[in-house]
Amino acid sequence: MKIELNRVDDAFHMEGRGMSSVVVNMDAAVDIGGKNAGARPMELMLMGLGGCTSIDLILILKKQRQPLKDIKIEVTGEREQIEGTEMKPFKKINIHYKLYGELDPARVEKAISLSMDKYCSATAQLRPSAEITHSYEIIAS
């Protein structure tokens, strides 16, 4: 896998492109000279985790013949500063799934477990340094 970053302005705004060639904008906070022209890199890490597990859930629930009408995911992360550095990695992450449709809770739980324990590479990447928990709700429609 390879990505490219190109600087857009004279500050921190960067455009990222991966294998799909879709542009993703990143920027820094205004208080350090950014212009809020894109997501922060650490936000993108949480978005990547949410995107990875959402793809898993959609595919697994489809295979289970569950009538998923929509999915929304909220990922929250708590960071802690490493003593003697400016680094603030995630220490706790929670993924909250909102699943819409007439879904079997047992199948939803199985799909989430499969994503977390077998399929989601982003979870595997983050789990050694962060406690990852999850919760869900089914909203029948």
Image (cartoon, grey):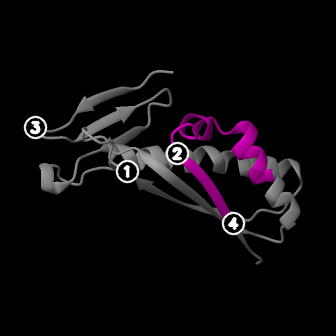
Residue 126, percent from left and from top: 54, 39
Crowd rating for badge 2 (residues with CA inside 10 Å; few <14, some 14–19, many 20+): some
Instruction: Classify residue 77 as left or right of residue 70.
Output: left
Dot 4 or dot 1, earlier in sequence? 1
Dot 4 or dot 2, earlier in sequence? 2
Q: Tell me how far mark 1 sits from mark 3, CA to CA.
A: 30 Å
Q: What amino acid does circle 3 point to?
A: Asp
* First to last magenta residue range: 111-136
Find residue 94 and report its image quarter. bottom right
Instruction: Classify residue 22 as left or right of residue 111.
Output: left
> Residue at 56% of width from left, 36% of height from top?
128
Numbered disc in front, either 2 or 3? 2
Residue 102, percent from left and from top: 83, 71
What label sits on residue 10 in the rendered view?
A: 3
> Residue at 61% of width from left, 41% of height from top?
123
Numbered disc in front, either 1 or 3? 1
Residue 33, percent from left and from top: 12, 49
Dot 2 or dot 3, earlier in sequence? 3
Q: Tell me how far mark 4 sits from mark 3, CA to CA.
A: 42 Å
Q: What amino acid does circle 1 point to?
A: Glu
> Residue at 77% of width from left, 50% of height from top?
113
Q: Tell me how far mark 1 sits from mark 2, CA to CA.
A: 10 Å
Q: What amino acid does circle 2 point to?
A: Ala
Q: What amino acid does circle 4 point to?
A: Tyr
Instruction: Tell me the residue that label 4 is attached to.
Output: 136
| Tag 4 near tag 2, CB within 8 Å | no
| Tag 2 near tag 3, CB within 8 Å | no
